[in-house]
Image: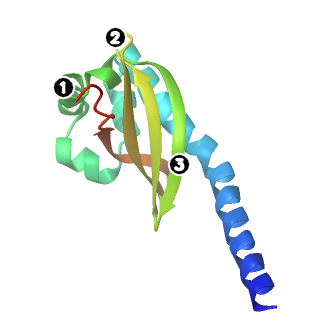
Amino acid sequence: MRIAFTALLLSAALSGAAGAQEREGPAIAAVIDDQLADFIARDLDGAFDHASRTIRRMFGNAASFGAMVEQGYPMVWDNSGARYLDLREQGDVWWQRVMLRDARGVPHVLEYKMIETPQGWRIDGVSLVAGPQVGV
């Protein structure tokens, strides 16, 4: 009886997590897609609008933010073929892994830190995920 009850609770928790991912995943992907399109169009104001308040304070303006992305994340600056991978929730933060191709077509995996605000989802950071070391 206890095993069946535990299994029922686990099943409910997993289905709740899957439901949250199904609800939040498209909204999160839409924000990331919009920002990626803004970078391709060189619409720095539009790209900066998708950043969280913390990121906006850190860079101060769209031009500084754009310069950081161009220099530090060239695969985001000139991106194509976004493919959404794992989405996970950790407290109030959601982490979305995205595979992008850079200007040369080389794939890169990034992890977007997403937070929900009264104005909607905002990007609160991006980090490059190290790929597997091949031939080492």
Query: What amino acid does circle 2 point to?
Result: Ala
Q: Which residue is mark 3?
A: 87
Residue at point 39% right, 11% down? Answer: 105
Give the side of residue 126 with respect to residue 1, left or right: left
For discs 3 and 1, the disc positioned in front in the rendered view:
3
Q: Secondary structure at mark 3?
A: strand
Give the side of residue 101 with respect to residue 16, left or right: left
The mark that comes first in sequence, 3 or 2, is 3
Q: Which residue is mark 1?
A: 67
Residue at point 61% right, 51% down? Answer: 24
* Circle 3 residues within 10 Å: few <14, some 14–19, many ≥20: some
The mark that comes first in sequence, 1 or 2, is 1
Q: Is 106 situated above or below 136? A: above
Whether residue 118 can be seen here: no
Relative depth, front residue between 91 and 134? 134
Picture quadrant of residue 111? top left
**How far, Cα to Cα, is label 1 from label 2?**
17 Å
Relative depth, front residue between 87 and 49? 87
Q: Which residue is mark 2?
A: 103
The mark that comes first in sequence, 3 or 1, is 1
**Picture quarter with the N terminus:** bottom right
